[in-house]
Amino acid sequence: MTLRELISGLGVKEIQGDNSIEITDIAYHSQKVVKGTLFVAIRGLKADGHDFIPEAMKRGAGAVVVEDMGRCTPGRIPTIAVSNSRRALAQLSARFFGYPSGALKLIGVTGTNGKTTTTFLIESILKEGGFNPGVVGTINYRLGEKETVAMHTTPESLDLQRILSQMKESGATHAVMEVSSHALDQGRVEGCRFEGAVFTNLTPEHLDYHGDMSGYFKSKEKLFTSLIRPEGFAVINCDDEWGEVISRNLAMNRFRYSLKKQAEIRAEEEVFSLNGIGAKVCTPAGVLTVASPLVGEFNLYNILAAVGVGIAQGIALNLVESGIAKVRNVPGRLEQVNNDRGITILVDYAHTSDALEQVLLALRGLSKGRIITIFGCGGDRDKTKRPRMGEISGEYSDFTIITSDNPRSEDPLVIIGEIEEGIKGLGMQRSRGSGERGYLVVPDRREAIVTGIQLSKKGDVLLIAGKGHENYQIIGERRTHFDDREEVVKALKALV
C-alpha cells in the first residue's frame, strides 16, 4: 500500500516528502521498525515516541507520522504531521489491515467490573450456537486453541487491528472484546465497527486518570454513541444508574437486564450457594433456566449480560443454557483452590472497592464459617480507593490481612498505611487472628498467604483478592513471577 493511499482522509496538517512510496508495515515502537515501515510517534505517559525517530530512521523507516514537525530532520524521509498521532495510528492501522472488524461481528464489553467473566460466558454461548468466536480480553487474546498472553485489557490500536485481522484470516465469525475506558479515551478502538456492546456497571476506578465519575462515564459512553453500527444492538445493566443514562439515549435495538425491576431480560427464583447459581431468566425469546457453577449475585448479572448477547444473535434458548453451564470457572475470578483442610480458598481479581464489596457481600451470605480476606492495593494507581477498600474488608470480613499487591514505584508500607486508615476507622485493632475480629499487616504477600491458611479453620472462607489471574508481582521496575494460586498450593504442601 502506498503512503498516499494509507493517509487518504486522515486529516493531515502537513506533508513533507514523497508520498508515493510503498509502506510494508506500521510500528509505534522503534525497535519493531524494519525497512519500509511507517513509524508513528505517539506520546505515552512515560515516553514520547518523537524521541525515538532517529532510531526508527536508522532501522529503515520509510516514513514517519508526528505531532511536532520540528522534531524531525527535514527531507530525510517523508513526514506527515497530524494533530493526534495516537488517534492517527488507530485509523492508519484499520486501513492497513483492511478494516477487519467489518468482516467480523465485533461485540464490545465495557464497565468497571465483570468484563472478563462476561466475555467468557458470551464466548461459550456463541460456540454452542455454532459460531467461531475470538476473544480480546484482560487474561489473553484467543481463538480456538491459540492463546496469547494479554499485556493490556484493550491492546494499542495497531496490535488490536493485527489481532482482528488474524482472527478474520483464521475463520472467526465473532470477536468479543473487553473495552477499557483508557482505550476509549485514547482512541485505540477507532477504526472498529461494533456489532453490539455490553455495559456491565460503573463504579469509582481510574479516577487518577479520568478526574471524576463524569469523565470516566463519558469515556465508556463513546462505545454506545459513536462506535456501534446503526443496525447493531446494546445490552445494558439498568440496575446501574449510569446504565440507565446510556439506555435512555439509545435509539438502536437494546436489551436491558435487571435483578430488581422490569426489563427485557430479568431473573426470577434466584438461588445462590458456594456451589453456584440457579435462576429462571425471562427474555423476549422465552424463559430459560440458569444452572451455573459461578458464585454470587454479581455473577448472575454477568450471566444476564451474556444472555442478552445470545438473544441478540438469535441463539436458541437451550443452547444459551448449555453455554452458560459450560463455564465452570474463569481464571482468577473467585477461582477455587482445592484442599483437604475443609477451607474454601478463593483467588479473585477484585481490585476496586466495589468489586471487593460485591465479592464479600456474596460470600457473607453463603459462608457458614469465618471470612478471612487477604488483599493489597497497586502502586501508581488511584489512591482514593485504598482506605475505602480497608473499610470494606473490615466491615464484611471476620479478619483481614493487609499485604502488598503490585507496589510498583511506591513504598509498599505507605500503601498499606493508607489501606489501614480505612480499617482503623471502624475501630478495629491489629490482632493475632485467634478467633477475634481484627486485622494483621503482613507486607510480604507470600507470607500473608501462608498466614491466612494457618489462621483458617474448617468451614472458613479464605479470600485472596486483588491479583486474580496475574502471575507476576511488580516491585519498583522489576516484574517477578508470582501467582496467588501457586502460592496457595505451596503453602498447603508446606503445612502438611
Image: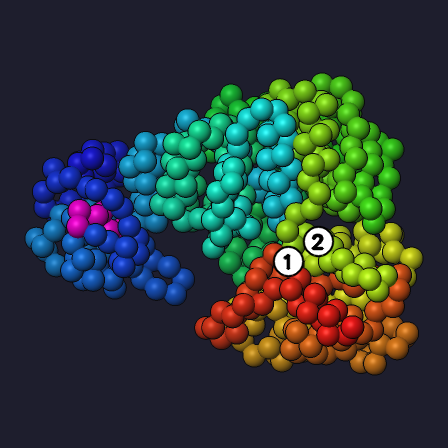
Tell me the distance, in whole angstroms, between the alpha carbons under discs 1 and 2. 8 Å
| 84 in magenta | no
Q: Which residues are magenta?
A: 35-40
Q: Tags 1 and 2 in contact by the CB under 8 Å rule?
A: yes
The residue singled out by tag 1 in the image is 468
Residue at disc 1, secondary structure: loop
Quarter the N terminus occupies = top left
Q: Nearer the viewer, residue 11 or 322?
A: 322
Q: Look at the image and say whether residue 37 sits in the magenta stretch.
A: yes
Residue at 17% over, 47% down: 36
Q: Amino acid at mark 2?
A: Glu
Residue in view at x 75 percent, y 44 percent: 294
Q: Which quarter shows the C terminus?
A: bottom right
Main SS of residues in magenta: strand
Q: Tell me: 333 left or right of 4.
A: right
* Quadrant of res 168: top left
Residue 191 pos. (x, y %): 38, 36
Q: Is residue 260 left or right of residue 187?
A: right
Asked whether the viewer can see residue 257, the reply is: yes
> Which circle marks residue 291 in the picture?
none
- Tell me residue 413's x, y (percent): 62, 80
The crowding category of the residue bearing disc 1, from other C-alpha atoms within 10 Å (few below 14, some 14 to 19, many at least 20), is many
Residue 238 visible in rendering: no
Q: Which residue does the numbered mark 2 point to in the structure image? A: 335
Q: Residue 17: x, y in percent? A: 10, 46
When asked about the image quadrant of residue 207, the answer is bottom right
| Residue found at x 83% / y 73% | 455
- Residue 334's place in the image compared with 8, above or below, is below
**Residue shown at 83% from the left, 69% from the top:** 456
Q: In the picture provided, is 140 more to the left or to the right than 431?
A: left
Residue 189's place in the image compared with 85, above or below, is above
